Image: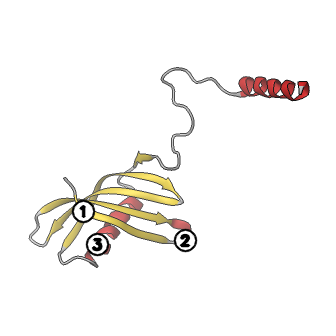
């Protein structure tokens, strides 16, 4: 029993010494954790713009309307077993009227999987 208690105390001390101290207001851990949403750092990245274009084309396969992709305005990404994207897209309808749409896309590059999870008019 004494040996077990001694080992627990030693392990606790080693952990306390080896763990870095984080000051108040400093970031702790990684900046990207699975399940956390983060702003897309470069919205003009070609891959992000291609995702927005693809989302419009995929939506049009199931909709009775015409939309023309203009550009992705903003978005968030979430690390999962792949990547979830929430994209705010600027598009024009058949009459040329501009609109803003929200597309949620799941993508897993290693399996070449891409799925339009949802698509709606943005507020």
Mark earlier in primary sequence (2, 3): 3
Is there any visible trace of residue 41 in the rendered image?
A: no
Circle 2/circle 1 CB separation < 8 Å? no
Q: What mark, if any, has residue 120 been given in the picture?
A: 1
Place of residue 14 in the rendered image (x, y in percent of width and height, measured from the top left): 78, 26
Say few, some or many: other residues with alpha carbon within 10 Å of mark 1 (under 14 / 14 to 19 / 20 or more). few
Horizontal side of residue 103 vs 67, given as left or right = right
The residue labelled by disc 2 is 111
Task: Look at the numbered disc 3 and give the secondary structure of its residue.
Answer: helix
- Residue drawn at point x = 51 percent, y = 44 percent: 32
The residue labelled by disc 3 is 59
Task: Look at the numbered disc 2 and give the secondary structure of its residue.
Answer: helix
- Residue drawn at point x = 28 percent, y = 72 percent: 59
Circle 1/circle 3 CB separation < 8 Å? no
Place of residue 120 in the rendered image (x, y in percent of width and height, measured from the top left): 24, 62
Mark earlier in primary sequence (2, 1): 2
- What's the CA distance linking mark 2 and mark 1? 27 Å
Q: Does 111 appear above or below 83? A: below
- Residue drawn at point x = 57 percent, y = 36 percent: 29
Mark earlier in primary sequence (1, 3): 3
Q: Does 103 appear above or below 39? A: below
The foreground one among 60 and 14 is: 14
Is there any visible trace of residue 112 in the rendered image?
A: yes
Horizontal side of residue 34 vs 90, given as left or right = right
**Quadrant where the image shows the N terminus:** top right
Residue 44 figure quarter: bottom left
Place of residue 9 in the rendered image (x, y in percent of width and height, measured from the top left): 80, 23
Which residue is outermost to the top?
A: 24
Q: Does 95 appear above or below 61? A: above
Place of residue 15 in the rendered image (x, y in percent of width and height, measured from the top left): 74, 28
- Residue drawn at point x = 51 percent, y = 26 percent: 26
Task: Look at the numbered disc 1 and give the secondary structure of its residue.
Answer: strand
């Amino acid at each position: 029993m004494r040996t077990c208690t001694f080992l627990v105390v030693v392990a606790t001390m080693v952990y306390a010494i080896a763990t870095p101290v984080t000051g108040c207001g400093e970031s702790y851990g990684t900046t990207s954790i699975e399940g956390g949403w983060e702003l897309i750092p470069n919205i003009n990245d070609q891959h992000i713009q291609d995702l927005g274009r693809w989302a419009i084309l995929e939506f049009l396969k199931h909709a009775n309307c015409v939309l023309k992709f203009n550009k992705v305005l903003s978005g968030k990404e979430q690390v999962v077993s792949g990547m979830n994207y929430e994209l705010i897209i600027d598009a024009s309808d058949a009459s040329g009227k501009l609109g803003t749409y929200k597309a949620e896309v799941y993508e897993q590059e290693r399996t070449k999987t891409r799925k339009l999870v949802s698509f709606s008019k943005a507020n």
